[in-house]
C-alpha cells in the first residue's frame, strides 16, 4: 500500500522514473510520441484496484519533460484518492500533453492521442482538464470510446460540484457550530465562476450573509445583484469578519500569510489544492481550531458527474451521490478530532483504507 505523504512530495530530478513510480505505487506509464502530428504526451495510471483509472488530460507548456512527468505522477495519484474517498468504483489516472494549447492543437494530434488512450483498452478513461476544450475531446473520441464529458453527454459538472461543496460545508457547520443551518452565517466565496455562482445561489436560498470577490467585474456585478451578495476586494476577502471561507477560484490560498489574517472557523470551497503545503498548513489550520474540508473530498461532484456518464446513470443520480459528501465530510471531521490528526490526512487514510479493503477482493486491472 502506498503511504500517506505530502501530495506535492514528488521529485523526479533526484530519482529514475521507475524508482519514482515505485515510491508511490504507480501501476503504469505510457509515453506517447508522434513526429507527424507533434504529439508528445504521458499517460499515468496510478491505481486501478477500484476500477478503471479516470482523470483528465492537461495540455501545458512544461519547461521540460521531467516537469511534465512530475505533474502527471502527482495528478494521477491525486485522482486515486479523490475517486476512492468519493465511493466511486474508479481508479486514478491522468494524462499530460506537452505543448502550447494556443498554437499546437490539431485534429490529427488529438486523434493520435485518442489512439494511445485506446491502446490501454479502457484501463484509462480521459476527460477535459486545463488547456483542453470540448472540441479537442470530440477529436479524441473519434479514436476511442474511453472519454467522458463530451458535449451532449453528462454536461457541465459545476452544479454537481457546487451541490457537493454546499452539503459538505453544512456538515462542517454541524461539527463546528452544532447545527448545519447556514442561515445568517457570514460566508465569503472567492471566485463566482461556474461553481462559485451555483454555490452562492444555494447559500442565498438558505439565508446566509454572502460576501464575494472575483477578478471579472461583470460577473461580480451580476452575481452580486442576482443574489444580494456583498462585493469585497480581491485581497480584502482574507480580512473580513466571516464564519466560513469558501475558496472557489485559486489553489494555495491557505498559506502563512492568509492564515494570520483569516478569522473564519471553517474553510470549505471547491478550488483544488487549497493548502499551499498540506503538512504545514493542514496542521496550522487544525491548531487554530478551524475545520478544513479536504478539497478533493468536497469538490468530488465533478468526478461523480463523469462517473454517471461512464455508468450511464442520470443527472439525478449524480446529485444524489453528491449528497453523500455530507456524510463523508462529517466522518472525516469526527475522526480528525478523535485522532487529533489534520483532516486532509484523515481523508487520505480513508481513501487508502477503501482501496486496501476492496483490494482483498479485486486485483488491479
Ligand atoms: P471558473 O473558471 O468558472 O471560475 C473561477 C472564477 O474565479 C472565475 O470567475 C475567475 O474570474 C475567478 N478568479 C480568478 N482569479 C481570482 C482571484 N484572484 N480572486 C477571485 N476570483 C478569481 O472555474 P470553476 O469551474 O468554477 O472552478 C472553480 C474551482 O473549482 C477551480 O479551482 C477548479 O479547479 C475547481 N473545481 C471545479 C470543478 C467543476 O466542476 N467545475 C470540479 C472540481 C474542482
Image: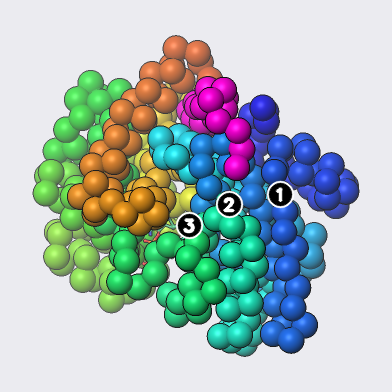
Q: Secondary structure at mark 2?
A: loop
Q: Which of the two marks, 1 or 2, is nearer to us in this view?
A: 2
Q: Nearer the viewer, residue 310 or 339?
A: 310
Question: Is disc 3's CB within 8 Å of ligand 1?
Answer: yes
Residue 27 visible in rendering: yes
Question: Is disc 2's CB within 8 Å of ligand 1?
Answer: no
Marked residue nearer the N-terminal end (1 or 2) = 1
Residue 305 visible in rendering: no
Cα gap from disc 1 to disc 2, whole angstroms: 10 Å
Cα gap from disc 3 to disc 1, whole angstroms: 30 Å
Q: Is residue 351 magenta?
A: yes
Q: Main secondary structure of the magenta part?
A: helix
Query: Position of 82 compared to 177: left or right?
Result: right
Q: Is residue 12 magenta?
A: no
Which residue lies at the image location 74% right of the left edge and 78% below the top edge? Answer: 34
Q: Are marks 1 and 2 in contact (CB under 8 Å)?
A: yes
Quarter of the image for residue 48 reads: top right
Which residue lies at the image location 28% right of the left edge and 76% below the top edge? Answer: 218
Query: Position of 215 compared to 363: left or right?
Result: left
Residue 123 tag number: 2
Which residue lies at the image location 55% right of the left edge and 49% below the top edge? Answer: 53
Location of residue 169 in the rendering, given as x and y in whole percent from the top left corner: 30, 38
Range of magenta residues? 342-365
Residue 250 tag number: 3
Location of residue 337 in the rendering, given as x and y in whole percent from the top left corner: 43, 16
Query: Position of 294 compared to 21: left or right?
Result: left
Q: Are marks 2 and 3 in contact (CB under 8 Å)?
A: no
Q: Which residue is mark 1?
A: 28
Marked residue nearer the N-terminal end (3 or 1) = 1
Cα gap from disc 2 to disc 3, whole angstroms: 31 Å
Amino acid at each position: 500500500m502506498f503511504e500517506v505523504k505530502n501530495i506535492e512530495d514528488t521529485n523526479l530530478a533526484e530519482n529514475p522514473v521507475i524508482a519514482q513510480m515505485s515510491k508511490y505505487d504507480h501501476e503504469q506509464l505510457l509515453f506517447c510520441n508522434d513526429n507527424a502530428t507533434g504529439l508528445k504526451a504521458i499517460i499515468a495510471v496510478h491505481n486501478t484496484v477500484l476500477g478503471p483509472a479516470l482523470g483528465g488530460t492537461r495540455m501545458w507548456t512544461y519547461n521540460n519533460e521531467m516537469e511534465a512527468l512530475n505533474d502527471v505522477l502527482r495528478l494521477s495519484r491525486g485522482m486515486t484518492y479523490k475517486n476512492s474517498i468519493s465511493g466511486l468504483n474508479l481508479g486514478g489516472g491522468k494524462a499530460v500533453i506537452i505543448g502550447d494549447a494556443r498554437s499546437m492543437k490539431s485534429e490529427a494530434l488529438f486523434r493520435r492521442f485518442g489512439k494511445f488512450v485506446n491502446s490501454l483498452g479502457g484501463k484509462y478513461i480521459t476527460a477535459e482538464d486545463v488547456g483542453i476544450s470540448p472540441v479537442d475531446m470530440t477529436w479524441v473520441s473519434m479514436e476511442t470510446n474511453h472519454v467522458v464529458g463530451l458535449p451532449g453527454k453528462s454536461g457541465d459538472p459545476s452544479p454537481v460540484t457546487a451541490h457537493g461543496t454546499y452539503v459538505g460545508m453544512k456538515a462542517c457547520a454541524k461539527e463546528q457550530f452544532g447545527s448545519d443551518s447556514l442561515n445568517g452565517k457570514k460566508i465569503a466565496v472567492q471566485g463566482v465562476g461556474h461553481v462559485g455562482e451555483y454555490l452562492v445561489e444555494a447559500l442565498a436560498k438558505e439565508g446566509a450573509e454572502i460576501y464575494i470577490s472575483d477578478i471579472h467585474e461583470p460577473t461580480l456585478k451580476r452575481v452580486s445583484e442576482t443574489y444580494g451578495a456583498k462585493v469585497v476586494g480581491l485581497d480584502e476577502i482574507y480580512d473580513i469578519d466571516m464564519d466560513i471561507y469558501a475558496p472557489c477560484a485559486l489553489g494555495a490560498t491557505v498559506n502563512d500569510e492568509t492564515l494570520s489574517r483569516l478569522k473564519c472557523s471553517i474553510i470549505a470551497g471547491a478550488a483544488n489544492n487549497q493548502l499551499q503545503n498540506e503538512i504545514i498548513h493542514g496542521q496550522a489550520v487544525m491548531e487554530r481550531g478551524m475545520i478544513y474540508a479536504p478539497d478533493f473530498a468536497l469538490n468530488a461532484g465533478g468526478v461523480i458527474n463523469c462517473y454517471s456518464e461512464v455508468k450511464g446513470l442520470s443527472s439525478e443520480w449524480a446529485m444524489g451521490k453528491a449528497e453523500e459528501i455530507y456524510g463523508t465530510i462529517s466522518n472525516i471531521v469526527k475522526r480528525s478530532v478523535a485522532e487529533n490528526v489534520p483532516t486532509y490526512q484523515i481523508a487520505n487514510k480513508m481513501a487508502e483504507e477503501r482501496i486496501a479493503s476492496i483490494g482483498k477482493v479485486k486485483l488491479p486491472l
